[in-house]
Image: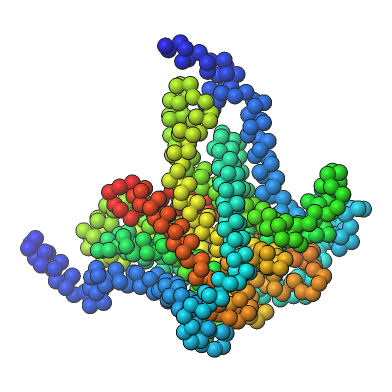
């Protein structure tokens, strides 16, 4: 009897049609599963990335495919003070905003890590600036920074600290600081919530041991919190640096690169030259100029992740 | 030895409850925790308050700080919202944004679920490198890609069409979702699938009937993230869409409502408020998924 049933079972599996068998054949299944994701990323990410580098060496404009002009776009850029100003402001913007975001974000994370009532409610509220579309909050900041009706100016004048309106976005340096302020405002929640997640993985017994050894608050932060937080800090910081350096929305919405190009970031300058001005080749060259910086940040991230033996490996965690 | 170590914490532990591991008094806690926290909340939330209050202020109060306290409204009005809904194409923009966000979310969820399953569960040779490649794709920012992508979109004949946005948004959604789902699939015990294999289930049956039902929370998180990210997207929508009626909300507010020298601040703020609401409401329903996936993705 048992022999018969076994035979039947084998035969039934042979009866499966070829589609089912093909779908159960592992190499085919792997290809089918990866095809949508890899296909989308190849057509709309890898190919444009290569195309962008190619465009940077041509004189393409909108509506006319260009010819190879070698390094001409880059030579032109090197002599362009507006480009160098954009490089300076991109680096300055990224540097100051990252330091401020991480300083304040870490502070906020440490505050939230205490035993507080309504903890999840607080976390939810704090994430709001990060959820809401950047451009829409940028418009709110634009209104807050309005030369005539700025609420900040009004408060300062009412308090008797100033007699005239504060000039936020009509001259170069105040405009730069105002943009950095808006970027920090938007970035704090993400940093704080990510670091809070890191803080919560640190075992309280470490702090108890340190307390028994008579440590000060600063020592506990310096020798326990900070080293334990470092891996997450490195990853979050890499992301933050990349997306601050290539920021576009805030600047485009609040100042459009003005006054007199003083707040152009590389991304806004590339947009101005490439899409608004129609010089696709030149815009692509400016965008490509961001690549070395991003490659550096990515390598930094890769090694930070590799040191943590990232999730792809099976046996480690 | 032991007495010298235990002596210092003793007086402070008498004043504070022991379970907070506390070495400070109530008033000190007030100054070091509650005051800075209140300042943070005030600064983080003020722009939203200001946005809301401006949206409901009549113009007479909006531009006159001397007779009306700017922090409050004496006679709230719906004029700005009425202007927005009936005199502009705002409902149309909302609709376009919603369609684009939903379609690109669905598309990226399907693609990234399959990819994450293949990478995490089918375990073929080189799966690590595919995973790493997808992770690296997340680090390529849109600011570098929008110029060449504009030419690609033009060649495909999709310029000025929302379909272009639906196809392009997955470039930043798929890497993120795949990353999130790989982490999620990893937490589902492999033994369940082995049992199903022994029972004679095919790989696709396993995915559909065992793995996916267990991964629903992960799918929800990925979906929320994708939806908010595509709702917020700006640069592609700005570069690829020309005609007014196909614009998404963030682009339309900035390019269509800002006209001439006199800005309609009330309408602008009303537009920003309404544009933020869908995401905020959506977010508030799933806030726990959102926070846990954000923190989970960072921890992985």
- Quadrant, the N terminus of chain B: top left
Q: Residue at x 44, y 38 (%)?
A: A227
* x and y, in percent, of residue B170 in the image: 48, 69
Q: Nearer the viewer, residue B224 or B299?
A: B299
Toward the front, the furthest residue is: A79
Q: Is residue A249 left or right of residue A153?
A: left
Q: Nearer the viewer, residue A42 or B217?
A: A42
Q: State whether residue B113 appears in this view.
A: no
* x and y, in percent, of residue B182 in the image: 38, 57
Toward the right, the furthest residue is: B67
Q: Residue at x 48, y 49 (%)?
A: B295
* x and y, in percent, of residue A66 in the image: 51, 86
Q: Residue at x 51, y 87 (%)?
A: A65
Q: State whether residue A230 appears in this view.
A: yes
Q: How is the image coloured?
A: rainbow
Q: Residue at x 55, y 25 (%)?
A: B22
Q: Nearer the viewer, residue B286 or A153?
A: A153
* The image quarter in which residue A138 lies: bottom right
* x and y, in percent, of residue A122 in the image: 61, 44
* The image quarter in which residue A7 lies: bottom left
> In the picture shown, does residue B267 fall above or below A311?
below
Q: Is residue A51 left or right of residue A172?
A: left
Q: How many marks?
A: 0
Q: Is residue A93 left or right of residue B182?
A: right
> In the picture shown, does residue A285 fall above or below B62?
below
């Amino acid at each position: 009897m048992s022999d018969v049933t076994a035979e039947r079972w084998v035969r039934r599996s042979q009866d499966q049609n070829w589609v089912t068998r093909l779908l159960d054949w592992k190499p085919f299944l792997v290809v089918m599963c990866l095809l949508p994701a890899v296909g989308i990323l190849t057509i709309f990410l890898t190919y444009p990335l290569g195309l962008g580098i190619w465009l940077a060496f041509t004189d393409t404009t909108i509506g006319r495919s260009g010819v190879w002009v070698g390094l001409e776009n880059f030579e032109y850029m090197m002599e362009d003070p507006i480009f160098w100003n954009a490089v300076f402001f991109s680096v300055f913007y990224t540097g100051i905003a990252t330091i401020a975001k991480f300083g304040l974000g870490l502070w906020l994370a440490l505050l939230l890590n205490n035993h507080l009532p309504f903890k999840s409610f607080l976390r939810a509220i704090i994430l709001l600036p990060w959820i809401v579309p950047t451009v829409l909050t940028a418009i709110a900041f634009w209104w807050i920074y309005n030369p005539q009706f700025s609420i900040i100016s009004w408060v300062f004048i009412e308090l008797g600290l100033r007699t005239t309106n504060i000039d936020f976005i009509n001259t170069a340096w105040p405009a730069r600081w105002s943009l950095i302020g808006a970027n920090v405002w938007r970035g704090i929640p993400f940093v704080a919530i990510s670091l809070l997640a890191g803080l919560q993985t640190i075992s309280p017994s470490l702090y108890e041991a340190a307390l028994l050894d008579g440590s000060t608050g600063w020592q506990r932060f310096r020798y326990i919190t900070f080293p334990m937080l470092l891996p997450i800090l490195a990853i979050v910081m890499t992301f933050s640096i990349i997306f601050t350096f290539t920021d576009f929305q805030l600047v485009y919405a609040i100042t459009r690169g003005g006054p007199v190009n003083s707040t152009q970031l590389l991304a806004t300058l590339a947009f101005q030259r490439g899409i608004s001005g129609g010089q696709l080749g030149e815009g692509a060259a400016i965008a490509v100029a961001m690549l070395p910086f991003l490659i550096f940040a990515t390598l930094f991230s890769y090694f930070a992740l590799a040191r943590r033996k990232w999730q792809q490996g099976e046996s480690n965690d | 030895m032991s007495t010298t170590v235990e002596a210092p914490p003793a007086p402070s532990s008498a004043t504070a409850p022991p379970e907070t591991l506390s070495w400070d008094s109530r008033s000190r806690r007030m100054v070091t925790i509650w005051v800075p926290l209140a300042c943070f909340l005030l600064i983080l939330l003020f722009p939203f308050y200001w946005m809301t209050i401006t949206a409901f202020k009549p113009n007479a109060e909006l531009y006159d700080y001397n007779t009306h306290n700017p922090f409050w409204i004496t006679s709230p009005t719906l004029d700005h919202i009425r202007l927005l809904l009936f005199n502009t194409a705002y409902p149309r923009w909302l609709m376009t944004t919603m369609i684009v966000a939903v379609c690109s979310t669905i598309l990226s969820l399907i693609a990234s679920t399959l990819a994450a399953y293949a990478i995490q569960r089918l375990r073929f040779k080189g799966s690590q490198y595919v995973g790493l490649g997808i992770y690296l794709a997340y680090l390529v920012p849109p600011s570098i890609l929008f110029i060449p992508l504009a030419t690609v979109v033009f060649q495909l004949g999709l310029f000025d069409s929302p379909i272009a946005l639906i196809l392009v948004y997955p470039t930043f959604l798929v890497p993120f979702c795949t990353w999130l789902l790989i982490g999620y699939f990893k937490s589902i015990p492999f033994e369940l699938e082995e049992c199903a294999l022994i029972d004679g289930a095919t790989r696709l049956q396993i995915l559909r009937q065992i793995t996916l039902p267990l991964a629903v929370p992960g799918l929800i998180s990925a979906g929320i993230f994708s939806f908010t990210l595509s709702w917020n997207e700006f640069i592609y929508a700005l570069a690829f869409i020309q005609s007014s009626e196909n614009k998404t909300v963030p682009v339309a507010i900035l390019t269509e409502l800002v006209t001439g020298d006199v800005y309609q601040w009330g309408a602008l703020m009303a537009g920003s408020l309404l544009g933020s609401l869908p995401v905020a409401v959506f977010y508030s329903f799933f806030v726990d998924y959102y926070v846990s996936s954000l923190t989970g993705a960072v921890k992985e």
